[in-house]
Amino acid sequence: MRGATSAAAVWAGVLHESSTTARYDDGMPRDHRRSTTSRIRTAWAAPALALVLALTACGPGDDEAPAPVPTAEPTIGVTGTGGTVPTLDFQAPLTLSDPVEEVVWEGAGDPLVDGGPVLLRVYTVSGTDGSVVRDDFASVPAAYLMTPDSIGSELYTVLEGHSVGARIMYAAATDGTPLVSTIDILPTSASGDISDPEAGLPSVEHGEGGVPTVTIPEGTEPPAEPVVRQIIRGTGGQVASGQQVVIQFVAVKWSTGEVFDTTWGEGRLPQTVTLGTDQLIEGFDEGLVDLPVGSEVMLVVPPGLAFGPSGNELASETLVYVVDILAVSPPA
């Protein structure tokens, strides 16, 4: 993404083009039910002082000046559990003189890294009539860089200092319309117990942030048949053909160990792909089916299920993919 992003674009989902539906394992507390009530702080002291001074100069005495009446403080309640659409309770039409921010629950995952990837599931309703403006539960979460240019300075400030797994309620008037949102911060890498490497297959080491490094076994011929090996087993729903899947991946040539494609690294983001639509090579497409969300999987793809014969420079290569499955859309 290039250029600054307005808050209105994020809340309304302009950056999030998918229209399918989403569900995934996001590491949030599944049994955590909590209601939070947020109150808008009134800021009428300065206008009140101006009014008193004006009345003192040209009106009745101080003891006769009418007392300023603050506006009513609207309340916003949030209920629901992680992975489900929240219920937002407020009196419509909502009047917001100042933004309202409340942590519904804290995250137990890694803190957000400035400039790094952030995966957000946003649910936004209009404060005017409660109509849904953006619903990432009905699609897949959107990936951004944790920078003001990528997500806008307003949302950047809201997210700053929080960790993966948090749910935040934020309400503000945008272009004259009051919008009430919940923002779920989701993992950008798989996490869990790592399985032992298998003889004759590449090994995987993990760096900061879960970034995988693939090492091809020296002097070993690649397998003739495709291999699917779970490195980390997720606990979310199973991936099905036809669904959208949000992934991180690194792709390596077996012959040289060279990385030829990746979503990891500075300025890079998780990608959303659709299975079963000829968008992907066959070995990759079929290898993710039936795996649970939250998994990290190694796919060893022989040439016949990869690029060749296609004239592609990788046509004769056995390819190794390490894929983190972050989120998936619900079945059609």
Image: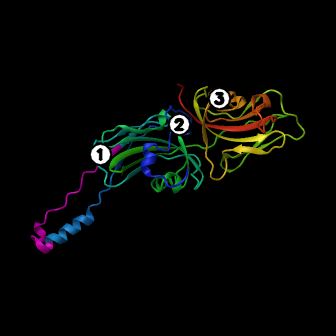
Is most of the magenta stretch helix, strand or loop? loop
Of residue 235 and residue 151, the one placed in the foreground of this image is 151
Q: Earlier in the sequence, mark 3 or mark 2?
A: 2
Checking the image for residue 278, the label placed there is 3
Q: In the image, residue 220 lies at what x, y percent?
A: 88, 36
| Residue 61 point in image, percent of width and height | 10, 71
Query: Dot 1, crowdedness within 10 Å: few (<14), some or many (≥20)?
Result: many
Q: Which mark is residue 94?
A: 1
Question: Would you call the spot at circle 2 few (<14 residues within 10 Å), some (14-19), or many (20 or more)?
Answer: many
The numbered mark at residue 166 is none
Q: Is residue 61 magenta?
A: yes
Magenta residues (range): 56-76
Q: Residue furthest front?
A: 311
Q: Using the numbered discs, state the Cα–Cα distance from disc 1 to disc 3 in whole angstroms.
A: 47 Å
Secondary structure of the residue carrying numbered label 1: loop
Give the residue number, with chain letter if any, for mark 2. Answer: 140
Q: Residue at x 75, y 28 (%)?
A: 305
